[in-house]
Image (spheres, rainbow, N blue to C red):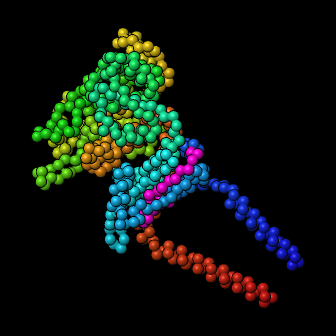
Amino acid sequence: MKRNKYTLGLLGCLLFLVINILGSSLTYKVDLTEDKRYTLSAEALTAISQINSPVTIDVLLGGELPPEFTRLRREINQILKEFTAENSQLSFNIVDPLENEEDNEVIIAELQAFGLTPANITIEENSKVSQEIFFPWAIVNSKNKTIKVPLLKNKLGATAEDRVNLSVQNLEYAFADAFSKLGIKNKKKIAVIKGNGELEDIYLADFLSDLKEYYNLGAITLDSVENNAQQVFDQLKSYDLALIAKPTQAFSEKEKYLLDQFIVHGGKSIWLIDQVAMELDSLFNEEGTSMAYPRELNLNDLLFKYGVRINPVLVNDMYFTQIVLATGNENNAQYNPVPWFYNPMVFSPNNHPINNNLEALRFQFTSSMDTLSNSYRKTILLSSSPLSKIDATPKIINLDMITSPPDKELYNNGNKPLAVLIEGAFSSAFENRVLPMTLVGSAEKGEQNKMLVISDGDIVKNQLRNNRPLELGYDKWTNNYFGNKDFLINSVNFLLDDSGLINIRNKKVKIPLLDQEKIAAQKTKWQLINIGVPLALLFLFGFAFAYRRKKKFAA
């Protein structure tokens, strides 16, 4: 009898040991979350599958943080565990760069010089409120490349819950995007078109800097067409996408034909067009006025052929962004944000991978567009708000309009297209016309293609501070962030068929945060439940055990 007991005990120990060994060597999990938060998408798995050398990820979120950011850190830890489980070449650390308080000033300066923007947080402790800074960034390091990963998403008017949810929702994309950049070997090419008064490079610097992580960039000057059109055409054909950023000078027929042939031969294009000549700086004079007038770029027939028309008008929108004006004298000036109806705040309809899960965008002196009936498919990605109207030009713009309350009854002609995606097998806009020049390899019919037309050139323009470019979408005057850069990068990725990572943005993640008011109101109740219930169960178990033991041995 005793031998059987010892045998069963030994077999039980062996079985327990085998189960533990198998459990440590085999990994199997089931994601029971409603939003599949802990299941990596196919695009993310593809991004990390290309990594075949050691990669280290340093997350700069160590140390003490408020509860909402502690929750963000926990989610970052979890998503990185998912990535490292799929590829053993990945490893990560969560560090506090400001751990050594004596060197904080030097470290902060070094991190900012590296391009890592700090964030301010409010900490409440013992009825005292203090402001601290931290760096919501991760740095992905491989043997020959370093990628900066922003971890905190900003959104106008967002609550703490919204901000955390938005940031968590973006984590998989942010890290997969970084891993994808490490794995890019053959970069596609983007031509930045010059020669017609386009934006200077310093105002495109932040956008182009981000694009360099994915693509090779080069400048093509169209005014060289007059001297050697064929050479410029052959050079342009080697690029995959043309970026036309806020031209201010009219295109010649030869320049238009060159761009037309680039499109017919499969080249993608992004047109950022200001159809009205008007700049905010022109209002800063003694009168505070300036004339807005139509800008003749000689592009109407070209864009008309592809199915859109940019009207020489200004969108006046009740959903506006603010500008900052100075009041008082030079020695005692005060800067106050004021509404500016010609700078619409544009919200995404989330009807396409390009514009899903984006923050509001900022447009400046934008025009409305019409979509025309033809064989091409047109998707309106961005529109003015329902409470907007159209102001014809020429028109005198006066800063005094900020002191006059608008007549809301006039804002009844909204939902005007501001950004239109066009797709189809494009035909030449010069079909059945007298050609301005002869190009070897020209064609009238093309294969499937895409282009994006946006009726605002300033959507891509970053601000400057001390003659250095700031992040695109950041307004230094109001300290607000807008979604301009994400929209434009998504657009380039989509046009160049790199839409896999964009789809990760569609993933909806809901992080339930604790209701602080309920916590305060029900604190005592839940303390009693958490402490009292286990003690009561323990007492009942002890009583039942003692009673059963007494009854058994009494018999």
Does 76 sit above or below residue 474? below
Looking at the image, which residue is at 15% across and 50% down? 327
Front-most of residues 203 and 411:
203
Q: Quadrant of residue 2?
A: bottom right
Front-most of residues 62 and 540:
62
Magenta stretch in the rendered image:
51-74
- Percent coordinates x, y for residue 331 in the rendering: 12, 54
For the C terminus, give its image quadrant. bottom right
Looking at the image, which residue is at 41% across and 24% down? 236
Q: Quadrant of residue 419?
A: top left
Q: Is residue 312 visible?
A: no
Does 545 sit above or below residue 314? below
The single residue placed furthest to the front in the displayed view is: 144
Q: Is residue 62 magenta?
A: yes
For the N terminus, give its image quadrant. bottom right
Is residue 365 toward the left or the right of residue 184 in the image? left
Does 190 sit above or below residue 332? above
Looking at the image, which residue is at 20% across and 39% down? 281
Front-most of residues 242 and 506:
242
- How many dots with numbers? 0
- Percent coordinates x, y for residue 406 in the rendering: 21, 42
- Percent coordinates x, y for residue 201 in the rendering: 32, 36
